[in-house]
Image (spheres, rainbow, N blue to C red):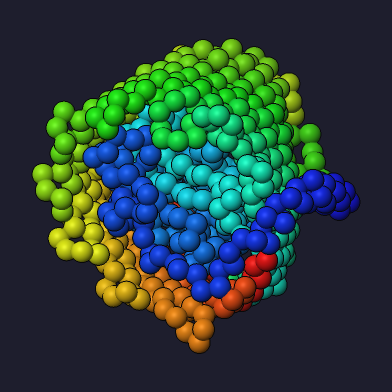
Amino acid sequence: MYASIARGRAGAFARAVVTSGAFCAAAAAQAESPAITELEAIEVSGERNGLQASGSPGRTQVSNAPQSLPAAVSTVTAEEIRTLNVGRDISNIYRRVPGVLANNIDQGDTGNGFRMRGFATQGTHGADTAVYVDGVPQNIPSSQGGAGHGPVFLEWLTPDMIRQVNVIKGPVSALYGDQNRAGAVDIQTLDGGDVASSIAVDVSSYKGRRSSLVLGGESQGFESLFVADLYRADGFRRATQTTRDNYFWKLSKVIGEAKYSARFSHYQSESEAGGYLSLPALQAGLSPRSTQFGLPGFGDAKRNTYVFNRAPAEGEGGFYATGYFEDFERSRAITTSTSQHTFGKDDRHIYGGRAAYNFVQGDSASLTLGAEARRDNGDAYRQQYRFNQPTANFINDFDMDLITYGLFAQGQFKPVESVKLLAGIRYDRFDYDVDNLKYPGASSGYHSSVTTPRFGIVWAPVDSLELFANVAQGFRSPAAEQISAGASTALPLGQPGGLANDSIKPTKVKSYDVGFTVRPFEHFSSTTEFFYIQNQDETVQTAPEVYQQVGDTTRRGVETSFNYQLTSTVSTYASYGRIIDAVVNNPPVGTGAKLTVPEHTYKAGVQYRDGFMGGQITLNADAYHLAGIPYYVGTPQTQERDMPVYTRYDLKATYDYQDYAFSVYGTFQPHRYGSEVAYGTSAGLLLSPQPSTIIGASMKYYF
């Protein structure tokens, strides 16, 4: 009932947008159709390729674009996303980025798997990476309906909405705030003038069905982009399914010296999930299609977001502003036995904004000064369900009013043409009011702050070589269950006890990077980086209801990648990431020291693109391999083992002919017990089994 009512409202909204935006359809009808599209080869700037995408600045240029940072940065363009098997999970847009783990675990809309640099171990859904879309932070603090503190939920995005994705390794930029420990992801959406209107259908294994409508165009100085995307799928596992509706409308116009844009997005979903299965039970003959405890998990979500942006119409100098508001609702029930679920729910109202001014002095210097604020108000709880019905027992129940303020400055200076220096600093303050409904005595008015500086340098002694280095600090705010702690036993509300940990501080990391990009000859680029990260004050639970900052974790690693345009029709890439150390330096008694992150990450791919029978054919093949992921079993959990290796192959063929684009694709995962997400327990490994083969086909018509 809920889903049908919501879809009806969303459909009414879509009809209103289409009607009010009819002018863009007329403009789109005159747009050039992608008959024989001149598509670029696989090209990602910064870390993956070194080669700069068209119009993107290099590291030695004075610019606030991510590609100009003295760091390893990968940029994924809209054209590259077109060649990927995005399918069920928008996280697949990261599949080719070196060192990044992007999960598609067939568990419904449960959050977007994203991990890098040894941070964000299994199930944290993008925490420890600050993710922004059009200047709006996406990390959700203290989520109970998701996965802990700072997860990212990007299911509201579809490939038709994205202009480009920038993945920044390390907390080197002061423009990004909370959760910026492993780095940051900056996502930019398209404008209406960037795309031609289209309609598309897609079908895939396990009853995957997607239909999408894109209306883009420009008229009388206005650019309008409307996207409607409906997705339905059953899962590989029994009793799994996903129903997802996405609507997006963005209106942009240049007025004077500024470009203004306003956008609205509506997302809703319902899902069932198979949960996790025991590796020993699978090896003993349990079907990988089984549902955990024979009782599927379930969940739903609804998210409405309004965003306003202002930016200079030309160049980077000038005033920038962003304002946003969203209603965020999400629930997820995780199976815990044959009769019980733990049901987590977030019901939040989030609003805020940021303003900055970029002072630019020619091509030799710039200074950006800015401020931002965010308020997150609402309920977050985890409740015990029995036979799919709520009980009076709760794990957590918080009524939260979380306010964060930030001030930031970032300057760049070129003393000589071949050298660029960068310095930045952030000051962030947290004024939290956490009302603990389960343990009222642990309720807390929390106030704290953190200051994090950054420094970097780029030196290009010759055109074919760039050397870069940086030292930077990033931070992560404390979670509500750390500030207002209590026993995790499921009990009714209003219990005595609990503890307010008002003295806890935001967790800081210090990150060191050294790297280089070489271009020894035309059409070839390779980037290598070494990193060392010290988490100076890791927060751990040292006793019941007590969280303290007791020590640190260490992460060391290296990543190397190359991109090579072999011929005018063939391009290729490859990358290797090695986590040398990812350890807790003083692990709690009865636990292992190693973090659950892969020691080895391999990625490689090739693309062929050429004219064919009056059209254009594009063939893509990608390979992805993980190995050396440790976990612990036993009581205490100190017996170290390695998870099964995981390998994934993606193949896709696209044929563009006049106003049509036809695609066929396949994903192949050959290892029987391989999975990107798994959990070590005292009894053994729990994992989410994956199908060996997923195939699909799509057709798009441009008008």
- The answer, for residue 677, to whether it is visible in the render is no
Q: Nearer the viewer, residue 12 or 573?
A: 12
The answer to which quarter of the image holds residue 439 is: top right
- Looking at the rendered structure, the number of numbered marks drawn on it comes to 0
Left or right, 502 with reference to 378:
left
- The answer, for residue 468, to whether it is visible in the render is yes
Task: Please state the horizontal and vertical placement of residue 371, each as a whole percent of the image.
Answer: 48, 19
Task: Please state the horizontal and vertical placement of residue 231, each as a whole percent of the image.
Answer: 70, 61
Compared to 65, does 665 lie above or below?
A: below
Q: Nearer the viewer, residue 652 or 599?
A: 652
Task: Please state the horizontal and vertical placement of residue 180, each as a whole percent of the image.
Answer: 41, 34
Residue at left 32%, top 70%? 572
The answer to which quarter of the image holds residue 330 is: top right
Compared to 87, does 406 lie above or below?
A: above
Residue at left 52%, top 55%? 91
Residue at left 44%, top 67%? 39
Left or right, 405 with reference to 290:
left
Residue at left 30%, top 38%? 69
Compared to 373, does 101 lie above or below?
A: below
Image quadrant occupied by the C terminus: bottom right
**Residue, far front:** 220
Task: Please state the horizontal and vertical placement of residue 230, each as a whole percent of the image.
Answer: 72, 59
